[in-house]
Image (spheres, rainbow, N blue to C red):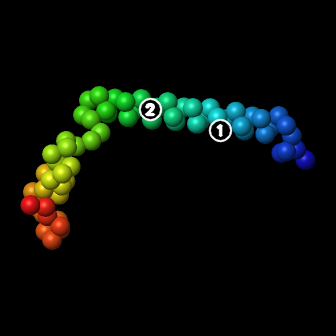
Amino acid sequence: AVGFTSASTILAQLKGVLLIGVFVFTLSFLFWFILKITMGLRVSEEEEIEGLDISECGLVAYPEFKQN
C-alpha cells in the first residue's frame, strides 16, 4: 500500500495549496487594481446619497424612505 500520510506528500500538498493561494491573490489583486483605475469601484457621493435605485433605474424603490 502507498502511504498517504508521509511527510513528503503532506509537504507537496501544502506547497500546492500555498502556490494556488498566492496565484489567486495575485490575479485578484491585479484585476481589482485595474478595475479601480479604469472605471472605479464606487459610485459618486451624490448617487450614494440619492440612492442607486434612482440613478441606475430611474425609479424610487422605497418611496416611504425618500429623503426630502
Q: Please give the name of the residue rendered at 29% of the width and 28% of the height, measured from the top-left corner.
A: 37
Looking at the figure, which quarter contains the C terminus?
bottom left
- Asked if residue 25 lies left or right of residue 16, the reply is left
Q: Residue furthest front?
A: 68
Task: Check disc 1 and report its element: helix, strand or loop.
Answer: helix
Q: Quadrant of residue 23?
A: top right
Q: Residue furthest bottom?
A: 64
- Asked if residue 16 lies left or right of residue 33, the reply is right
33, above or below 60, in the image = above
Q: Of tags 1 and 2, which is closer to the observer?
A: 2
Compare residues 16 and 67 and report the one nearer the observer.
67
Q: Please give the name of the residue rendered at 71% of the width and 37% of the height, measured from the top-left corner.
A: 14
The answer to whether one can see residue 57 in this image is no
Q: Residues within 10 Å of mark 1 (few under 14, many from 20)?
A: few
Compare residues 21 and 63 and report the one nearer the observer.
63
Q: How far across and down, in percent of the image, does residue 62 sit?
A: 17, 68
- Asked if residue 54 lies left or right of residue 33, the reply is left
Residue type at the position of mark 1: Val
Q: How far across and down, in percent of the image, does residue 63 sit?
A: 13, 68
Q: In the rendered image, which residue does mark 2 sit on?
A: 29
Q: Quadrant of residue 34?
A: top left
Q: Please give the name of the residue rendered at 57% of the width and 32% of the height, measured from the top-left corner.
A: 22
Residue type at the position of mark 2: Phe
Q: CA distance from mark 1 to mark 2?
A: 18 Å
Q: Residue furthest right?
A: 1
Q: Please give the name of the residue rendered at 44% of the width and 32% of the height, measured from the top-left corner.
A: 29
Task: Check disc 2 and report its element: helix, strand or loop.
Answer: helix
Q: How far across and down, in percent of the image, does residue 28 sit?
A: 45, 35
Q: Which mark is residue 17?
A: 1
Q: How far across and down, in percent of the image, does residue 40 sit?
A: 27, 35
